[in-house]
Image: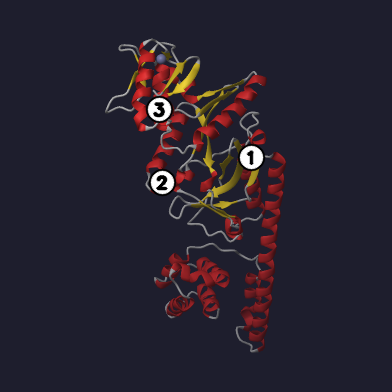
Amino acid sequence: MDVALYEGETLNITVEISRYSNAEKERMIDKYRKAAEKKAMICPFCFEELRLRAGEINEIHFAHLKGKSCQGAEAYDTYHNQTKRESKKHSVIKEIIYNELKGQELIRSDLKVEYGYKEKAEEKWKHYPDIYLNKNGREFAVSVITNVHEIGDEKIVKIINKRNKYFKEKGLESIWFVEDRELADDYEHRVLHLWEAEYGLAIKTEEDYKWDKLLKELSEVFPGQNIPRLFGYRAHGTMNLDVRSLYYVHSIGDEITFSVYRLILDQMKSPFRGFTLTKGYQMNISQALIIRDEIQLSDKDQEEMNRLEFSNQVLVQIEALKAEAMLSREANELRYEQQAREEYFASTVQETIGEIAEPYMTVDIDVVEYVSKLKYLSLSHQEAKALFYYLKVHRGELEDYGLTLTEVKNAVRYALGKISEPKIREWLVEIEIL
Ligand SMILES: [Zn+2]
């Protein structure tokens, strides 16, 4: 352990010795060693005397007398090792948060705030949260994480997952604050770019459940609409509409601010990313860390406003699609009128218009799979129809899937030569004349 009580104050021996030049170091170490032998160094946890050890192999440290064990010091060392990878900002941020929460403890009888390693020293935990919080029996593990970028390797992902799992097993809910120099948001594209590790840092709070409810309502009002897709977000695959939040903390000197991002995590594959529901917004510490049933971590009015704005944005997108559909319907009607004039397929016009006049479909299909079904002649009538609507809207995106419209049309022509089912042929013809 690198700390001891010396003359009534905490002395961190590593920090203390680093202040001196190499030439002076030996002399200072000797001075403190002698002081320790004269019982001047006390353990801040068990208040027993400590000795100073400074060998060739071990770093300089304080130790209890032989045969003495000290849970407090053991927990301190475990925690100290755990936080070695963090940046210098880590302890500054942690202390500010601790002091703010500790201040609320004074005025709330059902709140307990303590450093994780102190609270759980007796239980000898393998990992400690920076701060332990107990609100009316509900326990939280509050952790600050920095240097998330170091991660290119999977080490930190494992660390975070391990701690999340461990705290959960111990009955604690995890709250993470991420140093904000890792923040990479692009609201215009509604995307938050993430490190793989940030998946494990996204948490679920009261406000996120309210967002879940809103998304559920929107999906019921507009069935079949893929909400992220409406905003032009291109998901890796199917996304569960499970809203989570990420909390970034920004520190300048001894001041910190928080910003909150609500997002739906995309599938966990590279490039790691999520669909953002809102632009992040900033909060000062007293706003963010108010404790009610849990740490508030949000501005309720701002959240209400954001949800309203989001609903409006969804409506606008859907109106735009309808307008687009109207235009294409008119174009179709014109085309069919022309065909009618030519008395071509005259008897089927009414029926076909009926189909096309259905509410516009925003189809989200696996186009590669559909095209291969087409090649194997196993495409159903519904799938042929969906493919037509998909191509109508998204044909510009085919190359993203390694396809071209010509290639699709060639497959259609091939299928037209083989498939006799009129309902399928009808949609294949539509695709061919796109
Ligand atoms: Zn001790």
- Front of the two marks 2 and 1: 2
Residue type marked 2: Ile
> Image height check: is 99 above or below 71?
below
Residue 137: image location, x then y, percent:
57, 22
Say which mark, if any, is on residue 165. Answer: none
> Image height check: is 120 above or below 256?
above
Residue 96: image location, x then y, percent:
58, 31
Counting residues from the N terminus, which is met first, the one under dot 3 or under dot 2?
3
Queried on whether the Cβ of the residue with tag 3 lies below 8 angstroms from ligand 1, the answer reads no
Residue under numbered circle 1:
207
- Taking depth in this image into account, of 327 and 332 the one nearest to the observer is 327
Whether residue 48 is visible: yes
Residue under numbered circle 2:
151
Say which mark, if any, is on residue 17. Answer: 3
Query: Is 17 placed left or right of 100 in the picture?
Result: left
Judging from the image, what secondary structure is the residue with disc 1 in? Answer: helix
Scheme by which the image is coloured: secondary structure
Kindly give the residue lying farthest to the front in the view shown: 23
